[in-house]
Image (cartoon, helix red, strand yellow):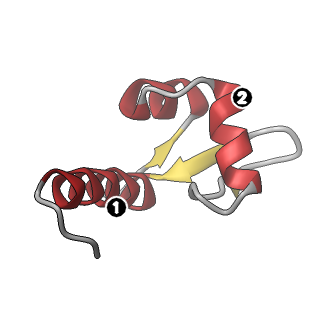
Amino acid sequence: MAQSLLRLPVVIGRVGYSRSQIYALIACGKFPAPCPLGARAVAWDSDSIDEWIAARIAEGAAKRHGTSE
């Protein structure tokens, strides 16, 4: 998929977390931070979201198979 910028409703749909959950994870350093687009607009790099999703899938697979990464 081509790299693009994703606004919050799309990110919410992709990861299944609420707005508050996403921002709490960002504050803890556990979710990619958004890129500023303007004075009051932000978006997320699609590649960073894809990588975050892939890491969660790999983490779940490792737990199911009794290994850790």
Name which quarter of the figure residue 65 lies in: bottom left
> Which residue corresponds to mark 2?
20
Q: Amino acid at mark 2?
A: Ser
Marks 2/1 in contact by CB < 8 Å: the verdict is no
**In this rendering, the label closer to the viewer, 2 or 1:** 2
In the image as oriented, which residue stretches furthest toward the right? Answer: 39
Residue lying furthest left in this view? Answer: 65
Quarter of the picture containing the C terminus is bottom left
Q: Amino acid at mark 1?
A: Glu
Give the spatial CA distance, label 2 vs label 1.
21 Å
- Judged from the image, the secondary structure of the residue bearing numbered disc 1 is helix
| Pointer 2 local density, CA inside 10 Å: few below 14, some 14–19, many at least 20 | few
Please report the residue visible at 32 percent of the width from the left and 60 percent of the height from the top: 55
User: Residue 60, how many percent across, how many down?
Assistant: 25, 50
Q: Which residue is mark 1?
A: 51
In the image, is residue 10 above or below residue 49? Answer: above
In this picture, is 21 found above or below 26?
above
Please report the residue visible at 40 percent of the width from the left and 57 percent of the height from the top: 52
For the point 48% across and 34% down, the residue is: 11
**Relative height, residue 67 to residue 6 (above, below):** below
Dot 1, crowdedness within 10 Å: few (<14), some or many (≥20)? few
Please state the total of marks drawn on the protein image: 2
Residue 1 can be seen in this image:
no
Up-down relation of residue 18 to residue 63 (above or below): above
* Residue shown at the point (19%, 69%) measured from the top left: 67
Q: Position of residue 6 (x, y in %)?
A: 49, 41
Q: Residue furthest bottom?
A: 69
Image check: 14 left or right of 1? right
